[in-house]
């Protein structure tokens, strides 16, 4: 017998990664029960009915690269799991993957548990963690296996930040080798840290400080080189690799070449590399500092190649690398930018303008990150049996990005003044209504930790 | 109110181009009404219930390249629309696109009407036609526009067969130019006919006759060259092009290059180029003649690159180029081979073996050809609102290909003796049961002519 | 014993395709006898001594693509072998290869003999002929063999000019096939004539006449396509191919790809594609008509890729496609432009400016064309034993191009007003002084017909 | 007045990088004075006349990568500058470039002077040094400038050998940056040392020792990766880079890509990678150990791509990486192999067999290394003014490689038993006869240190 339905989202245009069709979506016990013309059916008796006529219905967004409550250089993010996850929900994102960084010499598990304590009971989206690895040795390799079994199936390493985070090629190779066997996935920050260090040294010696010089010290070649390198390491290790925040089109060429050789390379980019360019660094003073991230914004023209790659499927996912430090606290150490709440509408707007299809929109903001990071088939799609993470977009209204609407604590918004065709009207997390008509109506901190599955590709 | 349902296919694993999930499929008035856990719902009262537990449920196949009831060199195909379409249904194909060839000097409409008279009331699948063009002039260009309006939106031209079918580059260019504006799509047989003519002349002069010499007179370079050329013509015309029966991996390279330049190139291959190789021509006598088609089977190794392209999405569709002349009638003029009924199971078997994913299976045999040729969203997918063309496959049983099971009149079967993991158990056309447990249970000749939409890409 | 020397060119910087060194060049009986410090040697007693201190000494230029005394559309070239060859010598070119075009149905030999009658006793440079083929049949194929034996070892065919010159792919293939065996070389005019015909038809229908529309009716894609095609034909024929007057960088890509597949592809470009761009077509009226040639001048930017290819060795030769019709006679049928006398200094000037090395200069204007067309080791280089075709350039002086200095009968000069760093001071043909300090001092009509060797690559 | 000639090599076929011609070569005061038919000329009165009729005359070989008298792991090379340079002369090589490695913390100059003390008065060929850099800091960067001024214009760094020699990417980048400005050239050993270290660790842990496992711990991907990386570093530094002993075809692809991006990449390979394959590691015991070098011999098939690249000019030079440890001393630490004396005949034999042209032979063994390393125009070619380093080869005789004929102290010969078409009959160094008919007739230790010029490309 069909289960009784708790919720029916009625009459909207459902968008999946392959189709668009008008259908009601029935939810039972937090899961999608049926799609189709369901109006008036017995199972719907008593169900909450949400009218979505004229609306677009998509799966809840999966943002697989965020930093909440992250300490850095003496200060801490403006936004913690409480405020950040609510902003995410307002923006249509129902699942996030953040990072757990063990302390120096600390076991991976301890680092993981410390992060859970920050998120559990505070995070309003569902959530998981990548494990940051700064030390690869026999002990931590064994710990990796245990983490995979605990549902932390991805590991982040760096070719950059020699002072704090960088691993040498041998360490990266070993970690990848381990994931070959334990079902984990190595995620890379790919920029050549040593060259960047030299370029910064040269810049400082020449008195070239300020945001304008930031992209010059982190050239696209440094990203392309490191990308090529981590792909070669993956190839030799017989393991896949996920390239994070790919920003330079030349790095894409390396991804393409790796795939042609048969290496399993996955890659994401971020909205900032799609919508913004290095021109922002020409803004006066503080205004430019907002855009200092690593990798930096790239020269005009670069972004068109990223869009092409997004269309062609060469870039799999769009994540945010959300990292919000208030302008006050950023001081001389700018690092990252907020984005957790703007991603979905920015990308939906791009789909409306024809830069990607509605199908690709769903793919890159939800389905692909869910699949890659072991959350499929629960997350990232609307089909019978999936978690009822449902976003209803009103495509006829207009949203204005800005501090006034971003629901974050951070005191600036990179897209201030920009607008999108589309407003997020309803957001459901496992069938529970979280956001409705611009108000948060859910239970704060009701998100669940997601044990992610080992990779199956 | 939800419509009453006529049919529920219950408990199978539905495969779409992006997902696999267990769901019931409800049908109302020939269309898919809902997917999900639907058992026991009011709307299903009185519906025919088909138990698909443990089964795979996919959309009906779309074969966009078949030749039924085709006269050639004095004889005619062994199979007409009646026998051919029944064989198609047994094989899980519910929609076919055949060809209309006007007589010399005849208006396109007349050629089209003549073909409809052959198919109407006889064809048991739904069907459409490509228009063959052998003469491009002001008059036929105007006729093209009218054909598009009548739902015949694709036009086939040849760079081969200088004696009967070949168009020169100017003619092809003009036809493409016209489709740029009228929403049609030019489909090409791409082999260099003039060079082939010379190679045949050389072969005959050297006494090199027989099937063994067939591939030598139609080398892969001749296909690659013509493919490159028609893509260049499309580029200059500002129009898309569909490359039919792509067989040589080198032709694929040309498709890839064209796309990289921004040309909209679509391409199909056929099972014979995926499952068979030129080794077949080494068979004795008559046995080898079965495999004489144009393009010919290609050397071992070539097929692995086609499979790769199929996986990567570089080949969009798998059609059959079905053309069945009995061995008796073939005589000295072999041409083509039967395939209309074997395509789906051959490809499903390949999916079972991991050569393509189940999602790609659905894409290449149904969804993609439907989209490309203006049949979407009616055909090629299972989603609310689509035609209820449903195929139920039992993946645990084994099917033996052969004359004994192919339901055709033609007296041989290229895959004789081969088996597939999977048996087609039920086939529904617009909700009507056509094939069930190996018997034809539908109304013969009940297929509908499909007015196809102009291209929307 | 060393022969007595007739001439010593003393103290210049000799440039070869691999070196630059200061040396005297001794000549005996029309050939280079020695290079080195030869001053005061017995063998030089009585020799004419030419002081080349501070000068550059290079081999005489070989222009492998000129049209002299050519009838076209009712009129004839302004310049015949007499005036054209003298202009060549003034410009440092001592060998030319022109074309012999048999009349309709006429045997190749007769066409050849008719051309020799035009040149013999009139041409002041040494000379040879390519044979133009417009008809390929058993008879003309046999004649090709005979022509090779008579020293006419290259054959020109066209994919353009459907009304007069175009061969179909089968004919080109057959001619190439024949050269595979007889040691000849097929040279192609590679533009898609049929598409160009349609584009011209469209342009005329739209009233788009005038030089400005010329390049639009002969797009770069039409050249790239035909180039790809003739390379594919050569590949299938197992023969080399020489692509004449390559103008579009995209055609170069095809050349590169052909080579990568192992096809022996040779190619030339012409100064007009290196120094001029389609901007010239924006000139008013008659001024623009001067630049109407086929292929047309290409958009700005294209030429930088040709220069790169020239540097890299991807383009082998620089010829002129010299064809001088007076503006008066050109009327509505512009065709080609003069160039026979300007090539060497234009290219030398480019070498001075660093666009190519001095070594590449010698290679592309002399050595490579000599090798490709069977004139090596007699022509194209300065080494013991070679013909003493010697050009002395004064690199410190400046030459002004223009009607006033081009020594032709044609009434315009494409490079009017342009200057070059360098003046051609002395020109020797087989040791005989032809040009000295701006005056013609040789015997008019003293050039020799060159029997060229079959290809040895 | 012409100088008096000391030597005339008479009647041979002189091969240059662009030509082959019969000529006498006259020498005066150690330099080439003239080429041509010089017999009986006054200047030749009293000159030593060497009959080279039927012989081939080429410039003396330049081996830009040798290790003589090198200490390693407790032992020292079997061959020092005395024995090694004599073997070189027997083999037709008249110039070598060895390495100077400063001790830990030692100034570059001191390391250089120490090496000069080893070579001066002992080396019978002319010679120069590359400077090995294992430490890059402000001090050593300044020392680099001084070394360039002293004629040591190339610097070797390693991405391999983490325990002893490896520089990190920042150090390599800085050294390259310095050469951008000081005219030096960075030469790289390009293999990923960290990955190799891990692979060796894995091999040891698995008990996989012995020569058979050597290539598995140094895979081609590790070379390709490091090659790509050093090219990217050069690109970012705005400097050229010379890739030493390129062995893997995939590394070549990286070289090609770098050049396409405009990076000035130069590269050499060695005879062992052209003539031998990893099959040698299948030999029993000690026999296999002879072939243990870094990079290792590569799988069969790889070498054909190197030959192709040598023909196409994608590899510029063939050096030996000569390093001769006796089998006795090699023990568990095999490293390198002898080759200083076999290179020229191996390559000449290849030219005879048509694998490269005679012109390319001269280019890769002499002219190109001379140009790249600042020895041109003195070394590497036979033209008036060049050093009279002349090698006379008798192409009709056969040479047998082996310990019996290699004139080295080392106790094995990798090419034992192989033969070459050709015997080196005479070798002249700056006009002085060093080897004649198989006997050393020169003055031992008479080689000169060569101050090399800064790069001019």
Image (cartoon, coloured by chain):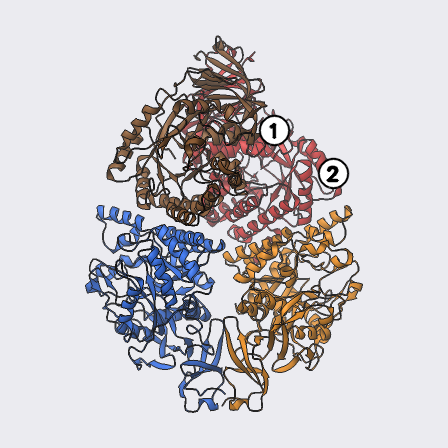
Chain colours: A blue, B orange, C red, D brown
Q: Which of the marked residues, 1 or 2, is nearer the chain's N terminus?
A: 1
Q: Label 2, secondary structure: give it.
A: helix
* In the image, residue B89 above or below residue A323: below
- The residues bearing labels 1 and 2 have C-alpha atoms spaced at a distance of 29 Å
- Give the chain letter at badge 2: C
Position of residue D192 measured from the top left corner of the image (x, y, whole percent): 39, 46
Crowding at mark 2 (Cα within 10 Å: few <14, some 14-19, many 20+):
some
Using the image as rendered, state which of residue D110 and residue B361 is in the foreground.
D110
Position of residue D59 measured from the top left corner of the image (x, y, whole percent): 48, 24
The quadrant the C terminus of chain D occupies is top left
* In the image, residue B231 above or below residue C109: below
Q: Label 1, secondary structure: give it.
A: loop
* In the image, residue A437 above or below residue A199: below
Position of residue A441 measured from the top left corner of the image (x, y, whole percent): 30, 82
Residue at image mark 2: C142
Residue C394 in sight in this render: yes
Using the image as rendered, state which of residue B97 and residue A45 is in the foreground.
A45
* In the image, residue B150 above or below residue A103: below
Position of residue A206 measured from the top left corner of the image (x, y, whole percent): 23, 46
Residue at image mark 1: C123
Specify the quadrant of the image occupied by residue A297: bottom left
- Camera-nearest label, 1 or 2: 2
Tell me which residue sits at (62%, 60%) in the image: B274
């Amino acid at each position: 017998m069909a289960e009784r339905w708790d919720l029916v989202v009625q009459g909207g245009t459902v968008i999946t990664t392959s189709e668009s069709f008008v259908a009601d979506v029935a939810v039972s016990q937090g899961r999608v029960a049926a799609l189709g013309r369901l109006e008036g059916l017995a199972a719907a008796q008593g169900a909450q009915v949400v009218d979505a006529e004229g609306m677009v219905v998509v799966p809840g967004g999966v943002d697989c690269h965020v930093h909440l409550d992250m300490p850095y250089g003496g200060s801490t993010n403006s936004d913690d799991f409480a405020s950040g996850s609510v902003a995410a929900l307002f923006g249509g994102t129902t699942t996030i993957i953040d990072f757990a960084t063990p302390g120096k010499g600390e076991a991976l598990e301890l680092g993981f548990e410390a992060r859970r304590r920050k998120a559990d009971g505070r995070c309003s989206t569902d959530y998981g963690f990548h494990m940051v690895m700064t030390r690869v040795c026999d002990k931590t390799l064994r710990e990796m296996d245990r983490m995979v079994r605990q549902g932390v199936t991805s590991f982040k390493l760096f070719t950059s930040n020699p002072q704090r985070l960088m691993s040498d090629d041998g360490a990266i190779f070993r970690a990848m080798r381990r994931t070959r066997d334990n079902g984990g996935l190595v995620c890379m920050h790919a920029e050549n840290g040593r060259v960047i260090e030299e370029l910064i040294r040269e810049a400082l010696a020449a008195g070239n400080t300020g945001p304008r010089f930031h992209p010059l010290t982190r050239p696209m070649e440094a990203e392309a080189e490191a990308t090529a390198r981590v792909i070669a390491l993956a190839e030799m290790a017989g393991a896949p690799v996920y390239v994070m925040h790919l920003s330079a089109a030349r790095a894409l060429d390396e991804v393409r070449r790796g795939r042609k050789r048969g290496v399993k390379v996955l890659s994401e980019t971020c909205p900032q590399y799609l919508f913004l360019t290095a021109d922002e660094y020409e803004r006066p003073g503080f205004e430019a500092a907002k855009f200092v991230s690593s990798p930096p914004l790239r020269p005009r023209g670069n972004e068109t190649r990223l869009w092409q790659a997004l269309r062609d499927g060469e870039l799999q996912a769009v994540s945010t690398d959300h990292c919000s430090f208030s302008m006050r606290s950023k001081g001389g150490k700018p690092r990252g930018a907020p984005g957790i709440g703007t991603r979905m509408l920015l990308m939906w707007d791009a789909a409306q303008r024809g830069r990607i299809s509605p199908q690709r929109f769903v793919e890159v903001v939800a389905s692909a990150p869910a699949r890659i990071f072991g959350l499929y088939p629960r997350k990232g799609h609307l089909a019978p049996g999936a978690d009822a993470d449902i976003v209803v977009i009103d495509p006829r209204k207009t949203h204005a990005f800005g501090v006034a609407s971003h629901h974050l604590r951070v005191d600036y918004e990179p897209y201030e003044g920009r607008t999108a065709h589309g407003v997020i009207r309803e957001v459901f997390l496992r069938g529970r209504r979280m956001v409705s008509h611009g108000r948060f109506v859910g239970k704060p901190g009701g998100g669940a930790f997601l044990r992610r599955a080992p990779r199956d590709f």
